[in-house]
Image (tube, rainbow, N blue to C red):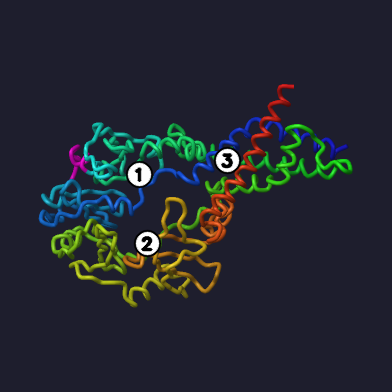
Amino acid sequence: MIAAAALRWTLMAHRYLGIAVGALMVVWCLSGAIMLYVPYPRLTEDERVRHLAPIPWQNCCVISPRVLANPAPIEAFQLEALASEPILSVRFGDGSSKSVNLSSGLPLDLMPLTTIASAAARYADSGLKSVVSSPSLVQYDQWTVQGAHGSDRPLYRLALNDSSSTEVYVSSRDGQVVQVTTARIRFWNWLGAVPHWIYFSALRSHPAAWTQTIVWTSAIGCFLTLTGLIAGIIQFRRSPAGRWIPYGGFRYWHHALGLVFGVLVLTWIFSGLLSMNPWGLLEGSAFEEPRRLAGRGMSASEVSDCVQSFTHPGGEVVSIEAAPLHGVLYLVSTRSDGTRVRLDRRGVEQPLANADLAFIRQAIDPRVGGYRIEQINREDAYYFSHNDYRAELPVLRVTTPNAAGSRYYLDPVGAGIRAKFDWDGRQYRWWHQALHRWDFSVTLRSHPLRDVLTLVLLGGVTAVCGIGTYAGLRSLQR
């Protein structure tokens, strides 16, 4: 009697939760299929560098330490061209930043609109350098709601006169382009990432509310799927001999497909829940390693002296950025063809030496020790390309003899940390990324196997959720 009552309440909970959440789960499945091919727009560093103009050394470099006056030490700086002017962007240890025009030595307090338009026009795909709209200031919109743009807000948004209807977002702080979208990307994202992540700007601009929405809808989806699996297995075991499924019509297909794809539905929703690190789960440790590797912060006089005495290394250099290591200021020079070299503060090439690697091995986490460093030229189980993210190779892999220890992936030119996987990070890799994207191995990440497998599985899961929602609605009507 108790078992029958429990089954009845389980079926009732599953039915009515299915009506409420099932349609959202169908949307998650269909939008996930679109995201296989059109991810959320993100301007990669490679793409940004390709659109930079060479630094105009003939106008460079005038600066006074007084311009960079700030009690906090300088953590990072970068020199690039903006509308034929050399611009130095500086970030301080207190989180503030400043940009300086090195042709005049004056702070760039107000970004000229012509300069902003010039930076944006380089992203036109048809060679047309005109801008359709005047720059408009936006704090948040649908394509800039993520937190990565926080220090650049408000952003200038400009529409370009090209065949792709490109829209470009420019930082009001230093004039760097931070986001680019096209009409195609915007259209498919309204069907893909926006509904999949419930990424509507009105909600996403409130991070706490958005996080709770994702967490609790996913948790309800997990409960819905789990009750369906329990009830489905019980009903299957209690079916009369010769009749495996005790239902007919749409409920028959929902039950049959649920027995086949139900576990996959549960793992996809559960892994999606874990993407939010709910209740502090899998958040990982504080990211203090970059400061330990860099050593002391840089002073204003040190930076201004470096900039003014720097010798142009030759070639079409589009970016110079600080890469301090062990308290010594080094620079990474990037040319227009993407090649990068490490230089000392005078402009002389200084590749990483054995002494640098020995310091990295000791400093990356002094509590652990025993790290080994190796350069790898192939992707591994943690560092690999996915959709629009390209894993840059070669890379320095830093690991401990203990398989449970943290692992790091460092830039072999400037020794900057590209990725870190502590215990929480490794769990996140397998419990969220692997379960959600089915990229357990190199084979499963390769085309066309990834596409065929994922689309077939998504089709089965969509059928389970869609038929179940429809059957629940019909029961409610009756």
Which residue is under mark 3?
A: 29
Q: Which mark is residue 149?
A: 1
Name which residue type carries label 1: His
Q: Is residue 209 visible?
A: no
Foreground: disc 3 or disc 2: 3
Q: Give how far across and how far down residue 475 sits, in percent.
A: 73, 26
Mark 3: few/some/many CA within 10 Å (<14, 14-19, 20+):
many
The quadrant of the image that shows the N terminus is top right
Which residue is under mark 2?
A: 290
Name which residue type carries label 2: Pro
- Between 411 and 209, the one lying in front of the other is 411
Of labels 3 and 2, earlier in sequence is 3
Cα–Cα gap, marks 1 and 2: 20 Å
Q: Give how far across and how far down residue 300 sits, in percent.
A: 20, 58
Cα–Cα gap, marks 3 and 1: 29 Å
Of labels 1 and 2, earlier in sequence is 1
Q: Is residue 444 visible?
A: yes
Local secondary structure at mark 2: helix
With 78 as the anchor, is 200 left or right in this view? right
Q: Which mark is residue 177?
A: none
User: On the image, which quarter does residue 119 sit in?
Assistant: top left
Q: Give how far across and how far down residue 447 sits, in percent.
A: 51, 54
Of labels 3 and 1, earlier in sequence is 3
At a point 50% along the width and 46% down the height, the residue shown is 36
Residue 324, above or below 5:
below
Which stretch did the figure color magenta? Answer: 108-118
With 67 as the anchor, is 350 left or right in this view? right
